[in-house]
Amino acid sequence: MEITHIDFLAAAKQSAKALLRSAPLILGVIFLVGLLQAFLPSNVIGNLFHHNAIFDSFIGSSMGSVLVGSPITSYVIGGELLSQGVSLTAVTAFIVAWVTVGIVQFPAEAVMLGKKFAILRNSISFFFSILVAILSVTLLHLI
Amino acid sequence: MKSDFQIMGIRFLGFVILCYVAIACLQFSVILSALHIALSLLTKILPIMGLVFILMMLTNLFVCPETLTKYVGKTSGPKRWVVAILGGIISTGPIYLWYALLKELIKKGMSRGIIAAFLYARAIKPFLLPLMVFYFGWKYTVILTIVMIVVSLLQGLLVEKIMGE
């Protein structure tokens, strides 16, 4: 496959557009994180979680399922949650559910790929986000 | 034309700016502190975004949704799982575009299990791995990526079994 400078420019333009589309949301999240950190004592968000792997993962997955946006945003929020004392298991469940469960995209998925499929896929993905979080963090501690 | 996602982002940023302005009127010192935290975070992320841009550009340069969909649709046997998962990992672009392409594959007889594995594997974004490493470390990123690849196969098999395909 021969790549011309036109292909190269088109790919650069497409990538720049994709990043620029996400930029307002990412900037909004970064400035909101700054505001929350300046306002709230560092342990407030951490106290929302109970340091129980399954329960925390459930909360993380629920948050990740309803929020929408570029995965970059989920890493920024996840990284900040981690620095606020939230467990890595909950943060992992959050970032995995963010990209695998799509409550907002559900209507489109149901119409295009079938309602039964969309319900099944999103339900399994929700359950798996908890499983993936617990498994990954356990492996991280073992290895 | 701006997409719904972009409009939502602009509205959200506008809302955050309004919060800054409102709080600045009451407690200016808090805003200075918030700006300092946000700008420090932004300074850390920006160089990594440069790397994300390069990786994203390379993916866009070599991966075409139509070609990839055709290839996933043509493969059979156990190899189809590998192709679906790899296809999901390297796929880019908005999910809505993929729904339309995958719908065509279902019409042509593609199992929904394969579609589920493909969609799950889309969660693994090679061009975003540098950012994940920045926040969570190498070891975590490698483990999570491997676990997600395995789970995308499990998800596909489970969906195929339940859907009776």
Image: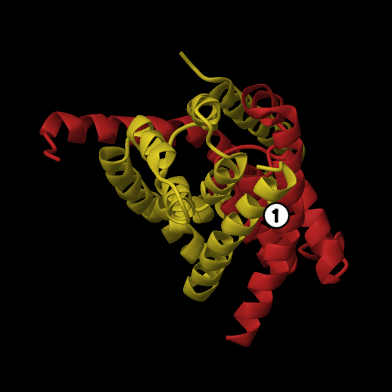
B164 or B149, which lies in front?
B164
Q: Which residue is mark 1?
A: A94
**Residue A84 showing in the rendered view:** no
What residue is shown at x 57% (from left), y 66% (from top)?
A: B144
Q: Is residue A26 left or right of residue A66?
A: left
Q: Residue furthest bottom?
A: A142
Q: Give the secondary structure at mark 1.
A: helix
**Chain B color in figure:** yellow
Relative to A55, does residue B20 appear above or below in the rendering?
above
Residue B139: where, in percent of width, then height? 51, 75
> Which chain is home to disc 1?
A
Residue B83: where, in percent of width, then height? 42, 50
Residue A42: where, in percent of width, then height? 76, 63
Residue A19: where, in percent of width, then height? 42, 37
Q: On the rendered image, what quadrant is the C terminus of chain B found in?
A: top right
Would you identify the image quadrant in which residue B37 lies? bottom right
* Letter of the chain shown red in the rendering: A
B5 or A32, which lies in front?
B5
Relative to A103, does residue A82 appear above or below in the rendering?
below
